């Protein structure tokens, strides 16, 4: 035998419930009543967020190297509600690396201005990797939904880091935490009711690298007069020029020697003729 309360919202009323058990035999004799008291406590369930995979389910997005940014959620399926019809008091969005260090270029970007209704009572610590939106009071889920839908992930590094120091894939994650107006960090209200009121959903970030750098070929400068072998087995242009100069000089010297020899023979012939 068990007790169950089918309500899942704030229709549940805290308090004592009494169950009385009696038994009777075949002769209709009835036993003394046995009272059982049950203390019913209202549990404050956290808000329900759907960012693409289902209610309060983690999700993964893909960022292509070279893109400016990508939304952290699928906006066309983004929903935020609270089953107890509570308002939302705070949303935090935190970018981190599970097993290493983020690039300096890993950032979160609010792409559109936050709703003007937040101007007077908004507490907004904002860094490159953290967005923390909290109000002095509370606001309907729809307004916080618009905030989550306006946040984008970006990395403008020429070569984003894909592996950590040990060579394992670097795991980037974005944690979205949503607090309703009855959130209590001690988990118990003054009236004894259980009050959790926070939901955490994780968005994994997968970076797709792009092969955007062609190979680079450089030639080493050689000293003047130094011949180096080329890919075809020939010599460099400087070596060819040097050999050509030496061949030309030898040819000129040979020509001069032949000219002088012919002159000598001519002179000798004139002497013999006379």
Image (cartoon, rainbow, N blue to C red):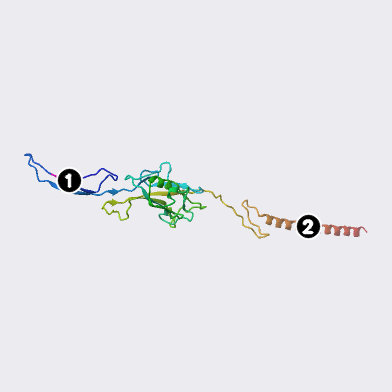
As measured in the structure, the alpha-carbon distance from the residue carrying label 2 to the one carrying label 1 is 129 Å
Is 124 in front, or is 128?
124
Looking at the image, the residue that sits furthest to the right is 274
Tag nearer the camera, 2 or 1:
1
- Determine the secondary structure under disc 2: helix
Residue 244 image position (x, y, % from top left): 72, 55
* 261 to the left or right of 149: right
Residue 43 image position (x, y, % from top left): 28, 49
Looking at the image, the residue that sits furthest to the front is 120
Q: Is residue 94 visible?
A: no
Task: Classify 10 Å Cα crowding around label 2: few (below 14), some (14-19), many (20 and above).
Answer: few
Was residue 124 drawn as part of the magenta stretch in this picture? Answer: no
Name which residue lies at 15% across and 47% down. Answer: 35
Residue topped by disc 2: 252
Name the quadrant of the N terminus: top left
Name which residue lies at 88% across and 59% down. Answer: 267
Which region shows up in magenta?
17-21
- Label count reads 2
* 5 to the left or right of 101: left
Name the quadrant of the C terminus: bottom right
* 249 to the left or right of 78: right
Residue 222 image position (x, y, % from top left): 64, 58
Looking at the image, the residue that sits furthest to the left is 27
Residue 144 image position (x, y, % from top left): 40, 47
Q: Residue 42 has which mark?
A: none
Decide which of tag 2 and tag 1 comes sooner along the chain. 1
Residue topped by disc 1: 19
Q: Is residue 266 visible?
A: yes
- Determine the secondary structure under disc 1: strand
Main secondary structure type of the part rendered in magenta:
strand
Label 2 with label 1: CB-CB less than 8 Å? no
Is 72 in front, or is 9?
9
């Amino acid at each position: 035998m068990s007790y169950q309360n089918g309500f899942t919202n704030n229709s549940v009323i805290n308090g004592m419930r009494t169950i009385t058990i009696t038994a009777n035999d075949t002769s209709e004799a009835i036993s003394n009543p046995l009272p059982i008291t049950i203390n019913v406590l209202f549990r404050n369930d956290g808000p329900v967020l759907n960012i693409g995979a289902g209610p309060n389910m983690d999700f993964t997005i893909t960022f292509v190297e070279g893109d400016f940014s990508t939304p952290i959620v699928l906006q066309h399926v983004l929903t935020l509600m609270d089953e107890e019809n509570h308002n939302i008091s705070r949303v935090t969005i935190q970018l981190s690396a599970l097993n290493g260090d983020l690039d300096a270029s890993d950032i979160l970007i609010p792409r559109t201005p936050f709703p003007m209704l937040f101007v007077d009572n908004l507490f907004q610590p904002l860094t490159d990797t953290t967005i923390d939106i909290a109000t002095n009071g509370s606001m309907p889920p729809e307004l916080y939904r618009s905030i989550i839908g306006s946040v984008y992930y970006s990395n403008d590094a020429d070569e984003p880091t894909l592996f950590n120091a040990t060579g394992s894939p670097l795991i980037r994650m974005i944690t979205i935490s949503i607090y309703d107006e009855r959130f209590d960090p001690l988990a118990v209200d003054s009236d004894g009711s259980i009050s959790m009121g926070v939901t955490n959903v994780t968005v994994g970030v997968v970076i797709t690298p792009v092969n955007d750098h062609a190979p680079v070929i450089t030639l080493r400068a050689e000293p003047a007069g130094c011949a180096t072998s080329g890919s075809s087995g020939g010599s460099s242009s400087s070596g060819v020029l040097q050999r050509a100069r030496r061949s030309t000089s030898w040819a000129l010297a040979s020509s001069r020697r032949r000219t002088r020899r012919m002159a000598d023979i001519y002179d000798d012939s004139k002497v013999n003729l006379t």
